[in-house]
Amino acid sequence: MDYIYNNDTVYCYPNTDVLINKFNIKDALKLESLERDLTALRINELIQNPIEGHFDLVHLQDIHRYIFQDIYVWAGELRIIRIAKGVMFAYPEHIEDESKKVFSLLNRENHLMGLSFDEFCERLAFYKSEINMLHPFREGNGRVIREFIRNLAHYNGYEIIYPLDKSSYIEAMKASPSNVTLLKDFFKHIIRDFSHLI
């Protein structure tokens, strides 16, 4: 399912759906390929050296800025247009206020420290869904949120190993706005405790 944008004349070249980029590439497929390659390199760097933060909106923005710094001048900036993909994501004028609610709750839950494995997977699924509904950036939300969630898991002594087959993940994410059970079950299969290796 493709994204739906409300006449995006802010981020795209005139009369196209190609994002304005640092390479001035106006071919959608070429940009997609380059973006995939460059962001994969940055994500691999983050796996080795995660960005530290307070698990809040600023932390999320820092991750986005790092991953997309090579491609877009607006890397790390909150989007200013409305977007949808099956569901309408948070309106740009509400992103900051809504994110405060989500991340304040995460802080009150002590960033999920001390939970049982089952409880941890359930709450991680909840926050993954909530942050996804914010969809704070014009592009790259999935990659950035996955890295944020990976950091949160790592903070709690877990590692996440995403499978090559994304079908179960996609189905779980589609269902997550109303029910995080599939996403919780997905996490239970891909999260490993690495504390014994320390």
Image: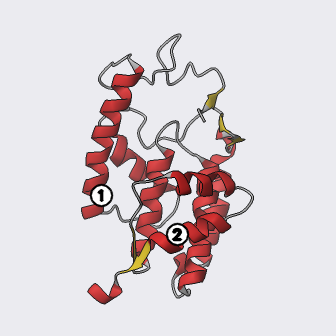
Q: Quadrant of the N terminus?
A: top right
Give residue 162's quadrant in the image: bottom left
- The answer to whether 163 is drawn above or below residue 40 in the figure is below
Local secondary structure at mark 2: helix
First reached walking from the N terminus: tag 1 or tag 2: 1
The residue positioned farthest toward the right in the image shown: 178
Mark in the foreground, 1 or 2: 2
Between residues 173 and 130, which one lies in front from this camera angle? 173
Tell me if I can see residue 132 in this picture.
Answer: yes
- Residue 58 percent across, percent down from the top left: 48, 55
Between residues 11 and 122, which one lies in front from this camera angle? 122
- Residue 142 percent across, percent down from the top left: 49, 48
Q: Residue flagged by tag 2: what amino acid is it?
A: Phe
Q: Quadrant of the C terminus?
A: bottom left
| In this rendering, position of residue 25 left or right of residue 144 | left
The residue that mark 1 highlights is 46
- The answer to whether 144 is drawn above or below residue 110 in the figure is above
Residue 183, numbered label: none
Residue 187, numbered label: 2
